[in-house]
Amino acid sequence: MAQLVITGNVATMAQGATAPPVPGRVWIDGGTVVDVTTGRRRVAGFSRAPEVDVGDAVVLPGFVDMHNHLAYNALPLWTEPGRTERWLHNKHWPDADTYTESITEPAWVYAKACPEALLAYVQVRAMAGGATAAQGWPTANRGYRTVMRNVDAEDVGTGRDDLIYTSVVTKTGEALTTAVRRMAAGSGFIYHCAEGRRGSRVLSDYTDLDRADGLLPTLLAVHACAVDADGWARWDTAEAGGVVWSPLSNLLLYAETTLVDDARARGITVCLGSDWGPSGTKNLLGEMKVARIAADHLGYDLTDAQIVEMVTSNPGTLLERCWHRPVGRLVPGALADVTVVRGRGRGDAWTRVVAARERDVALVVVGGVPRYGDTSLMTAAAAPPSFAATVGGRRRRVAVPDPADPQRAWSWRAVLDTLREVQQDPQQAIATAQARASAGPRFAEDAELELFLDMPDTRRTGRAGPPKDPATVRIPPVPAPEHDAAYFDLLDAAPIPQGVLAPLRARFGQ
């Protein structure tokens, strides 16, 4: 990894958003932030490093999406036709009549027939919203390369695979005891917990953790929207961990969301996650805006500065407990993940960052490597081989390698054409998936890649499996990676939120 210097209005987030961005430089070497300087001071040893001047744009730590299910992100928003009553919890809607045909089967076909194109698409979609790291990557029959940071599997150079554990499945009995034991030993636990309406049965996910002494500093409870004020009060402030808030998904499914003020009152660190294609925003730019809308609607005491912290220094605080490396802050020794955003509209820097759209993301750097951004900035930063793509009405360069030759850039057209071929002919794609799976030993290092879905399907005995009747599989068109009119048309037609999310369209200028 080479050197890089980025000049602009730097928000180090060293103490969160307590200080505004100031003109300065971020000095990167070998995937690590070496220094952050202001004024004319320069750092020795960078005479040959490329320097990128981003002007008045804000230079931030890379955004961290702390909750997703990336394998499903080539699918559009989903609502059960004719349903106006809100769902009870996350064990409820997977039993909907159209869930399998609308979500499980299309996602399964993409994951098996064209996993490389699927991974490329979902990473472009995430980086278009400023993300440098994400949680919720699909497991696979063998290892695979990503250009974004994989929160689930990151070892920060230690070679260890026990820094963070994750679970979508509810833990009970010995499995829960094991999870608590790992947390007590210092491992992080990112756990889908108490996702549903307050008073619903999934609250037991949280109360079981409490009884097992599992409310610990390395717990990151995903959703926890069923937890009431008394439940949050049970989390000892001396042991405060984190909660991952996905307000759009919660409001779309349950018409209520996490009691963020109650969690924060206990010292619990709140992060944002954009969740998955079927019930989430496209990316963190969308989720930040929904956080603003939800906070205003529900009367939460939340500033725009604190919303920016939820995608930078807050996840950094929690991940550093497990990784023992600074992340989510631009400080010496930190992982060199950087997001550059042109502030939009009026107000202070934090308000303008929250208001930013996809066209306002100027540069995304992961591990010191420029991966996404304006053509001029990617060129100035000496980015690796990249392809052209138009996202948010602005021409971009994207450095995602061709899976057949990592030294070459792939093609955005090839990525989209591959996905569209699957979408337009699912039956042929299923045949392709079967041929890939039978090409050799499934779990060999050189086997054809095969991704595994992580969400349950109660109509498939709890597991997401292949279509029972390939002839009936229908896959909707591949959505644009950015928030667009088609997305907002689906969102506006969703009855459960009762119009609470309607302002989001205007915030994206649609």
Image (spheres, helix red, strand yellow):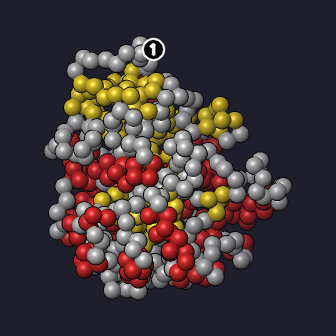
**Which residue lies at the image location 31% right of the left edge and 26% below the top edge?**
25
Report x, y in % for residue 333.
39, 34
The residue wearing badge 1 is: 48
Residue 73 visible in the picture: no
- The extreme top residue here reads 47
Report x, y in % for residue 180.
46, 69
Report x, y in % for residue 199.
33, 86
Disc 1 is placed on an element classified as: loop
Q: Indicate the quadrant where residue 275 lies.
A: bottom left
Q: Indicate the quadrant where residue 399 lies.
A: top right
Report how many numbered discs are placed on residues in the image.
1
Q: Amino acid at mark 1?
A: Arg
**Mark 1 neighbour class, 10 Å CA radius: few under 14, some 14 to 19, many 20 or more:** few
Q: Is residue 465 left or right of residue 260?
A: right
Q: Is residue 150 left or right of residue 21?
A: right
Residue 51 visible in the picture: yes
Q: Is residue 42 left or right of residue 414?
A: left
**Which residue lies at the image location 24% right of the left edge and 59% below the top edge?**
292
Q: Quadrant of the C terminus?
A: bottom left
- Depicted 345 relative to depicted 221: above or below: above
Report x, y in % for residue 273.
39, 59
**Which residue lies at the image location 27% right of the left edge and 33% below the top edge?**
10
- Depicted 156 relative to depicted 165: above or below: above
**Which residue lies at the image location 66% right of the left edge and 57% below the top edge?**
140
Give the camera-side residue of 271 and 456.
Answer: 271
